[in-house]
Image (cartoon, helix red, strand yellow):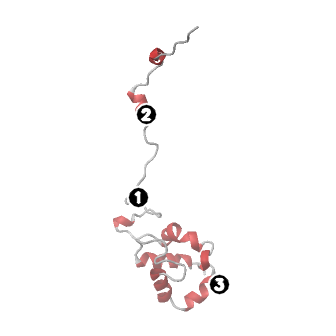
């Protein structure tokens, strides 16, 4: 007995329309860069300064929430006492230029000095 395999069976299968194919391979999401809204509702690209909370949440929280590598924790008076005793100008300069394990401006290379100050103010607001 011989068994014959051919391409005739493939022509018998239902074929998807180009519309069905387009739906199946359509993107399921979008990636936005540059024009995306900054946390806090204001776009930094539109010239609006980000709030201290927005800068903290996006760029500072990873280290300053748990005190990674000695970073002063948010609203922890003991962590900030010696730093604040040096004066706010020194604290701001260290944040902008980098200090110890903290790189310049933390991880926010496009933050303005005012946004960095706002983030510091947010981190010490409840002290």
Instruction: Describe the element under mark 3 as helix, strand or loop.
Output: helix
Q: In which quarter of the image is the C terminus?
A: bottom right
Crowding near pointer 3: few (<14 within 10 Å), some, many (20+)?
few
Crowding near pointer 1: few (<14 within 10 Å), some, many (20+)?
few
Point out the frontmost of discs 3 and 2.
2
Query: Quick one: label 3 or label 2, which is nearer the N terminus?
Result: 2
What residue does disc 1 label? 36
The residue nearer to you, when weighing 57 against 110, is 110
Query: Quick one: label 1 or label 2, which is nearer the N terminus?
Result: 2
The residue nearer to you, when weighing 41 against 15, is 15
* Left or right of residue 125: residue 37: left
Res 3 visible? yes
What label does residue 23 carry, if any? 2
Q: Do the residues labelled 1 and 2 touch (CB within 8 Å)?
A: no
Query: Quick one: label 1 or label 3, which is nearer the N terminus?
Result: 1
Which residue is found at the position 59% from the left and 78% from the top? 71
* Left or right of residue 18: residue 81: right
Q: Is residue 9 above or below residue 78?
A: above
Res 73 visible? no
């Amino acid at each position: 007995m011989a068994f014959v395999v051919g391409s005739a069976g493939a022509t018998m299968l239902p074929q998807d329309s180009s519309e069905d194919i387009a739906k199946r391979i359509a993107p399921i999401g979008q990636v936005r860069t540059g024009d995306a809204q900054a946390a806090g509702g204001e776009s930094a690209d539109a010239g609006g300064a980000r709030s201290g909370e927005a800068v903290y949440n996006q760029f500072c929280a990873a280290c300053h929430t748990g005190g990674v590598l000695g970073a002063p924790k948010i609203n922890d008076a003991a962590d900030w006492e010696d730093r604040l005793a040096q004066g706010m100008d020194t604290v701001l300069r260290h944040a902008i230029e980098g200090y110890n394990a903290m790189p310049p401006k933390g991880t926010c290379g496009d933050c303005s000095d005012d946004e960095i100050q706002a983030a510091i103010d947010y981190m010490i607001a409840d002290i």
